[in-house]
Amino acid sequence: MTRRSAHASTNQMLERTRDMGLKTIFDRYDAQQPQCGFGMQGVCCQLCSHGPCRITPKSPRAICGATADTIVARNFLKLEVHGAAAYSHHLEEVAKTLKATAEGKTPFTIGDEGKLKEVCKAVGIKGNSTKELAIALSDVILNELRKGSDDPLALVKIFAPKTRLEAWEKLGLIPGGVHSEIRDALTKTMSNITTDPVDLLLTTLRLAIATGYMGLVGTITLQDILLGTPQISEANADLGEIDPKKVNILAHGHVPLMATAVLQAAQTPEMIKLAKAAGAEGIDVLGSMCTGQELLQRSGHSAKGMGAQMGNWLAQEYIVATGAIDLVMMDMNCSIPGLKEVADRFHTELVSVDSILRMAGVDKNVDYAPEKAAEQAKELITMAIETYKKRGNDIVIPKNKAKGVVGFGVESILGALGGSLDPLLDVIKKGLIKGAVAVVGCTNNRNGHDSAGLQLMEELIKKDILVISAGCMSSAAQIEGMQDPVSAAKAGPGLRAVCEKLSIPPVLSFGSCVDIGRIGVLVTALADALNVDPSQLPVAASAPEYLEQKAVADGVFAVAFGLLTHLGPVPPVTGSPLVTQILTQDVEGLTGGKVLVELDMVKAADAIEAHIMTKRQGLGI
Amino acid sequence: MKYVIIGSSAAGSSAVETLRKLDKESTITVISEEANLRPYSRCLLSDYIAGEIEEDGLAFKSADFFEKHNVETIFSVRAVRIDGEAKEVHLSNNEKVPYDKLLLATGSVNFVPPIKGVDSKGVFGLRSLEEARQIRNYTQKVRRALVLGGGLVGCETAYALYRTGIEVTVVEMASRLLPVQMDERASEILKSDMECEGIRVITGIGVQEIIPTGFWARLFGKPGKGVQLTNGERLKADMIVLAAGTRPAVGLLQEHNPGIQINHGILVNKKMETTYPDIYAAGDVAESIDTLTGKRSLSPIWPNAIIQGKVAASCMAGRPVDLAQQIAMQNACEFREVPTISIGQVEATEKEDQVLETYRPQERIYRKIVLRHGKVRGLLFMGDIRGAGLIGSLIRTQRDVTSIKELLLHPEISWAHVADQ
Amino acid sequence: MRKEVMIDASKCNGCLSCTVACSAAHIPSGDPLEALLTGEPSRIAVYSVHGKAVPITCRHCDEPACVNACMAGAMQKNAESGRVKNENTGHDCIGCWMCVMACPYGVINQREKEGRSVAVKCDGCVGRSVPACVESCPNGALTYGPVNEYAETKQRQAAASQVA
Ligand SMILES: Cc1cc2nc3c(=O)[nH]c(=O)nc-3n(C[C@H](O)[C@H](O)[C@H](O)COP(=O)(O)OP(=O)(O)OC[C@H]3O[C@@H](n4cnc5c(N)ncnc54)[C@H](O)[C@@H]3O)c2cc1C
Ligand code: SF4
Ligand code: SF4
């Protein structure tokens, strides 16, 4: 009842909304308490009209006879299907844009030809020109998305470590086309088709692998080719960075395509002139959530001129509550319905820029189409300028500002280390850095907005464990200055020394949540360099505040990949002892990975450290 | 045994119930100067004036209450004297009623301010049903009313008169309305709400004189009557309701007192015994110890009258119990659909007092709690009264709440949170 | 012996079945969907105490503070059944909120009924052999049985200790 954000700026805005009589996510969270234990345990089934059924001591089976194990496993797979579908939508948008760009139909230019060539070579695409290669690669990816589930995914074969492939093959987990996998999984979860909980769970692994190599790795690879591979650069964050004298456009969501087009157009004299005519000093494109992270990490090239990062998922209503945001361009997922209520209290215009997003009350939709992106960008900016004119005086901008370094990834790390991962491996071998943990995924009100995530990061770096952040957790760290190299002072002596020597922070920003793929690429590179399986590395993954269904797919992928995967909020599986045991124990025998659920972040850090130490021992370091 | 009770209202009737429960045999006699055949609730008189309920709706006990409890009633007669030695109550009809145990449940009387003209026509108090009837009748004939006093009864009456369709002005001598039950902000909210409805509120100014019809015409050359305020302003008013507070009804002890100590009210101990043997007092007329201040005080509110009546009756019937955890200042009211509850100390008075508050004018919500040394001293909830009962019990029990301090203002606080601390 | 609703908070998982059943039991049709649609209030509440669900409803006290406080005579304790209620007692609730102020358990709420604001609280499901909330609880957190001092203490202890 007294939950607060970990960020001063958010709390200030929360108070402001309360004073205005606006109900926002913290209030709605309170109003939902207590939450139903059946739902929390995953034993509620609403599939058929006999239902809803729930498993209780009095009624151990549903009306159809389904057990808690079946219902829990089925619900869990359904959650993951959502995540997988959303990721494949993202990939499809990017692939189509790459193709249209190669054909010269978009405002973009190919951002990383080197990567294009490299990937084409790996995939076996031949071609003379960049254009030919890009078109062919896009077609291959689009085909991979759509082909049958009996036709193994090429990207898995090409990118997965050999040892992983062997493990997966044995279990029949090499997936086919993503859309077909989604269809199969969804079909299985219909009432009374697949009711075997073990098969349902194996299906989650298979779907996760499809998602991992297409939705994650595939998407980031194409985005890098299209928009450029991230480079290490400086970034600003938090609400104090809002300039009330500018027209402010908030790029909010996950897919950075329209946002990049808008950002580029906003810097044209034509648009600036328009803004000035309206009385503004200029136009700022501000980042929110993962779209913001995508722009930030490319602010050295395709996203030059990018404003600051405002915050993550939970902050969206509070960003708008400053009263200084003129337009929110919402792409793909994570625009919450509550945003509309806050926007309506001010002048802020909400616009969907993705055909799959429709929000009640939002009637302006500028659905991104690669071929029309240039025009659409101008249209959006013009709308923002028009709204700016209606902006009132009720503006409050918190003073909080933060800075940090962003743009990490295999390529930029290699660049910084002089072309080889050896220096990194060296400090790991020497024990200066014990290991690395990807602290990724969402933010969650359950533990008070970023509090758990930040606590975990602090605990880990104290133990000389390098933290790699992505998604909402990356914003969390940015705003609290943990991606600022000076925060090395908070790390243990070994990690601190390494950070200070390289002028890097102890929490590396790997970008958005889809950039979890980038972390997978790094882990693969480390495994290759050491000639071991990823499950043998002193690494782990954590989603301390996981929230939605894409994160479920990410988490299961990490388990399939062989990683210890820590979750903060308890996933809705505890109603089935069998499913719980498989996810937290038995699956380790199959993939090497497993789920660790721990709500206490100090204990979680201890458990992760213990795991890392075991892995170090196994490697003899 | 012969029990005699003077007063048949809250304290008197609850004493009747308890006595009869504990003692089926003895005689119980109830004396009341009112002609009320069945106990009615004074607190509802304003709704009656407004025409929203009828006389039947005022009753808080069944019509056969006295028969059912086998009570001998002496109504429309005043007790005028108590002969402690002879153990007799003398009545205004010159009869004498002997008693073994006597309960004084005489309540309060309306305070009549010493202003010229208070006894003229069209000037009313609001304490009894009879007065309410007169007011209700009178409202049919008038256009403008003035309520003298902006306390709880004054505000209730003002709204009630207003609801009958006449113009109403409230004049309060203090700087704000409900100065006892509310803090400055709450008073301000109440005042602006009243003004929004169309009730005129004048604070910080008193009434100098009530000018009756003839005089008014002579003075101002126009028919009508009205008041002159202390600032010289003259207000026209066809009727005036005096709501300037109440005083304990100790009139029958004024001429002859067998030896009952009186301060403001009749002093009683925890067993509701007065300082004279076999005579008890309960309700508005009694002065008892307040849990919060530890001091003697009047507690002229309904629930305390009921509880005191029960305690007194129990002690009279030979089952002694103690009056426990009583707070004199507790009130619930609702004006203009804004419910308000205030209990105990609603303002910080000492250096160490700490105030917690939520004020959300848009939602018309104001919640405030006063703490001292980790214990709740008082609450004032306006607009959203959830949790008032629970916090009220924390005030009464003076339980330490340090560990749940940040939950106290939350409307969803429950006693499980308290039990859990 | 008088029967009472017993609460074992340790068994409650916050499903709110009891609240739906309570609402349904207080409309003529008894239909839960209709109760939800018409906003019929529940007279039992399930609170979240540090994340643990704890059901709370009226204790039908022996010395009910709410009855003492009620200045309309609406709130009464029935001598035979031991139930404390403010509906159909021969006196109408007038919405003065004195009972809300008085109840130390905070189990009396406000509601709109026939255009008026009135107090609403557990009526002990008069007329039913087992209260609706008890009947609906799938977890055995609510039971209905005779009160004796032992049970009462135990239940208080349980409520206090289980809300970890
Ligand atoms: C308009 C109005 C609104 C109120 N609203 C509220 C409210 O919202 N909340 C609240 O808590 N309280 C309220 N009160 C106060 C509440 O009514 C009293 O606290 C309560 O009635 C006290 O009960 P009692 O039995 O002590 O005395 P009373 O109700 O005053 O009854 C005393 C009785 O004794 C009789 N009597 C007195 N002297 C003699 C005598 N010598 N011989 C014979 N009979 C005698 C009187 O005629 C009277 O009938 C309100 C009061 C009024 C007038
Ligand atoms: S409503 Fe409160 S005071 Fe009244 S009987 Fe129930 S628990 Fe006791
Ligand atoms: S029905 Fe039972 S388990 Fe569900 S909320 Fe109510 S008391 Fe708790």
Image (cartoon, coloured by chain):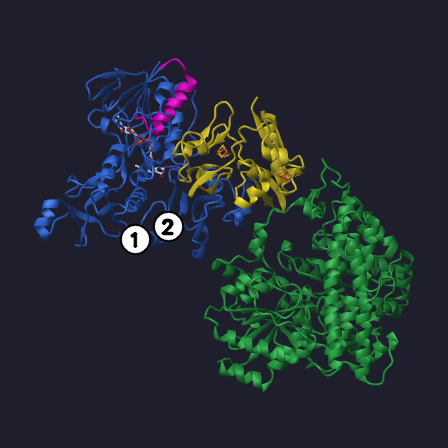
Chain colours: A green, B blue, C yellow
Say left or right for A122 vs A601. Answer: right
Sequence order check, earlier mark of 2 and 1:
2
Instruction: Please give the chain letter of the residue carrying mark 2.
Output: B
Along the line of sight, which residue is nearer the eye, B288 or C142?
C142
Residue A69 in sight in this render? yes
Is A530 magenta? The answer is: no
Q: Residue at x 76, y 59 (%)?
A: A553
User: Residue B183, labelled with which disc?
Assistant: 2
- Residues behind callouts 2 and 1 on a single chain: yes
Residue C46 found in image quarter = top right
Question: Residue beneath label 1, please?
Answer: B198
Residue B421 in sight in this render? no
Residue stretch rendered in magenta on the structure: B7-26
The amino acid type found where label 1 is placed reads Gly
Residue A427 found in image quarter = bottom right
The quadrant where ligand 1 appears is top left
